[in-house]
Amino acid sequence: MKLYYNPLSTYSQKTLIAFYEKEVAFKPELVDLSSPEGKAAYAKIYPIGKVPLFKPSDDHMIPESTIIIEYLESHHASGTRLIPDGADAARQVRFMDRMSDLYLNNPAVTLLFERLGFSKHSEEELAKASKYLHITFDHFNQRLANQDWLCGAFSMADCAAIPALFYCQVVAPFTDYPNIVRYHERARQRPSYAKVMAEFVPIWEGRLAQGNVS
Ligand SMILES: N[C@@H](CCC(=O)N[C@@H](CS)C(=O)NCC(=O)O)C(=O)O
């Protein structure tokens, strides 16, 4: 069972948290997204070129972080249950997963890539990214007032939200949202995310020092 991923990629981190929570073993396949050669080699495996990609066997490919987690949940009873039983509870988790990807992770990456000079965005695009982030922060802060995790128990929604918050600290600090500050601290104490951080933070800090973070 191979997982193609890049340690700095938020969507990769989302699935790594899920693998560790579910206690599912995998063979890590590091994808080099920083060089044309690395990208070209990976395009032969997955032409869309995005990570993560999961291959439970040689003839079975599962792309997309959410779909990988759905697969883990339906094929492995071990570890943390990431999508609850019950249609309403499961739909709530899926909604918060979508919200985290679309209105937290994606706008955070837009601002990060702009800051790092990887891509150029119009003022309108930057304003829209910032607007989505603050709407999401408001919503998260309210949800987290009376519960530790976005949907009560730890779930796929938290796998999706936590990695983006790391980069938000750089481009859209959430210090005015005390419940998110506490949530992020709680996440850092969680063994699954602590393991993810142990791999990517030294790489991130090294790249920052060299001025190369792709
Ligand atoms: N919707 C995808 C998004 C995956 C994605 O955007 N991955 C980024 C890294 S976080 C990537 O592979 N970027 C490389 C590229 O676009 O060439 C998912 O949930 O897996």
Image (spheres, rainbow, N blue to C red):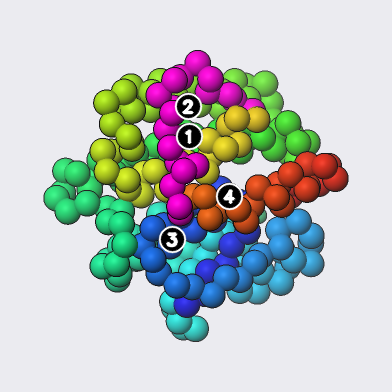
In this orientation, which residue lies closer to the viewer: 41 or 166?
A: 166
Furthest-left residue in this view: 86
Q: Indicate yes or no whether the magenta region holds residue 182.
A: yes
Q: Which residue is mark 4?
A: 197
Question: Helix, strand, or loop for circle 4?
Answer: helix
Q: Which residue is mark 2?
A: 181
Residue 195: give x, y in percent of width and height: 53, 55
Residue type, mark 2 in image: Val
N-terminal of the pair, mark 1 or mark 3, is 3
Q: Position of residue 151 (x, y in %)?
A: 28, 38
> Which mark is first along the chain, 2 or 3?
3
Q: Nearer the viewer, residue 160 or 176?
A: 176
Which three-letter amino acid code belongs to the residue tagged 1?
Glu
Q: Which residue: 40% across, 69% down?
A: 24
Q: In the picture provided, is 114 more to the left or to the right than 85?
A: right
Coordinates of residue 5 in the picture (x, y in percent): 59, 62
**Mark 4 surroundings: few (<14), some (14-19) or many (≥20) residues within 10 A:** many
The magenta stretch is: 171-192
